[in-house]
Image: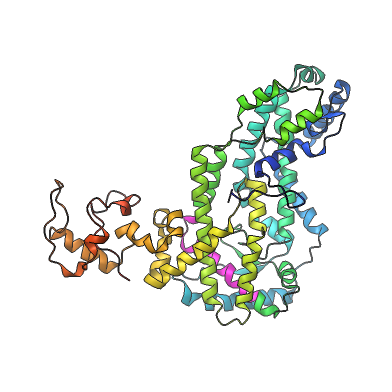
Amino acid sequence: MSSNPPRDENGDNPKDPFQEMFERLLGSQGMSGENTPGGMPVNPQAMSMMFQQIQSMMSSGGTDEPVNWELARNHARQVASQQGDPSVTGQQKGAVDDAMKLAELWLTPNTAFAEPSTLPAAWSRAEWIEATAQTWKEMTTPVAASVSNAMTEAMTKQLPPELSQAMGGADLSGMLSGAGSMLFGMQLGQAVGALSCEVVSSTDVGLPLSKDRSALVPSNIAEFSEGLELPATDVMLYLGIREAAHVRLFHGAPWLREHVLGLITSFAAGIHIDMDRIESIAQDLDPMDPSGIQDALASGVFSPQMTPDQEATLARLETVLALIEGWVTRVTVASTANIPSAAALTEMMSRRRAEGGPAERTFGSLVGLELRPRRMREAAAFWEHVEGKRGIEERDGLWESAELLPSNEDLDDPEGFEQRRGLLTASDDEMDAALAKLLSGGYEDAEGGPAAEDSDSSAGPDSSEANGPGDSDGFTDSGDDAPEEPGDAPKD
């Protein structure tokens, strides 16, 4: 994610996602010579009139929520309708049903997860917006609340006394919070509306945006297929398999969805603005010089500062999203072997991600996070490696809990994954062998003395070499029930 900041309209200068968010909220991109940041007039009379308009607007549509959700939903539907949003036809519904039935059939041999009872649907863009609204609320509320609070605190402390006088003693913080709610609503509606015109399914951003539901968006699939010179049925089936794979994964690992949303919430909760830095810059600013204020905004003065906890959370979130996408890619490749155009479609999906597809842009503008396609490719290679050595059942068994999932280090070095994890990834036979070794005294005793000589040949000649005394890396995440030594090195 975060290492690929969004670029400007020319595709040149990288921007921090939060800096871009603040520029939109503060309006610093449209500053004129007679105005302060955000187009705020310097003249007190004009300023007073502007805030009277804001108060009137808020009194008719204000909300205590960090995002005006009604405004967001209405604006999203308006954006979708402007691009054209035809209703789903009976023929399209039939095509989706046929594709998803075949997708489930081809997917079954390539995953240990059972087919869920979810019935697939065909959605228009407006239906996609309505079906995903609750998840967008879950994901963006923590970010909106944290950024709004930070922005309100920063601006309230820095606004001059003359502004309060011009407003007649009105509650500045309340007005800023209300205005931020509306601005966030507009921004969210714009992003979700634009996204509804691009996504091909309910999971196209890497998450099941509509919980316990599965759907394809036929109008967007038709646009996706334009110029590919591939059979429309092949494209529909390929995308249906990807959708079914996502749904199976999140159904088979019911903890996963809340885990990802929890990481996003945890990241957002740590958002803060460096007030000391703002005060330091403010001392050298001339409030009557809009260009100087604009330069300060452009320098990222309002951008939240990343904390160590946020950096750790970001790394975990980046890894788990890459693992999800990598697993889906691996399962899709295996399940589409009978589609002649599958290789071309897989390459197209890879380019779509690398060039900044819907997931990357949406996370960047709404959550302040960027997806990194490089990690997704490495995650796909990791799952292929584990499948080759352990098989499908044990590959998918790693999704039983967050503690079993591979780390960023494991994506870099799949070969060393088993050795680092020890018995955490061992097969039943290896667990039995390790238990027999423990009971026969083959490990160090409780006092840390030398281990009894191991006469159990099933442990293999290389076990002591792979897991010598003191090698406990495999148990950093496995809890208190793990043995003191990792035991036998996993076998191929």
In the image, is residue 167 above or below residue 433?
Answer: above
Q: Is 169 rendered above or below residue 84? A: above
Location of residue 376 in the rendering, given as x and y in whole percent from the top left corner: 54, 61
Of residues 187 and 463, the one nearer the viewer is 463
* Marker count (numbered): 0
Does 16 lie within the magenta span?
Answer: no
Q: Quadrant of residue 295?
A: top right
Instruction: State the image quarter where residue 352 is shown.
Output: bottom right
Coloration mode: rainbow
Indicate the position of residue 327 as horizontal and vertical percent values: 50, 65
Question: Residue 70 occupies which quadrant of the picture?
Answer: top right
Q: Is 256 situated above or below 166?
A: below
* Residue at 61% from the left image edge and 74% from the top image edge: 238
Can residue 391 be seen in the rendering of this structure? no
Task: Assign the magenta stretch its main secondary structure.
Answer: helix
What are the residue bounds of the magenta stretch? 236-256
User: Picture coordinates of residue 112 (x, y %)?
Assistant: 44, 70
- Residue 190 is left or right of residue 330, and the answer is right
Visible residue check, residue 89 = yes
Tell whether 225 sits left or right of 42: left
Task: Residue at 26%, 66% (x, y): give it.
Answer: 430
Pick the quarter of the image with the C terminus: bottom left
Q: Identify which residue, 107 or 451, lies in the foreground.
A: 451
Q: Is residue 251 rendered magenta in the image?
A: yes
Residue 459 % position (x, y): 21, 66
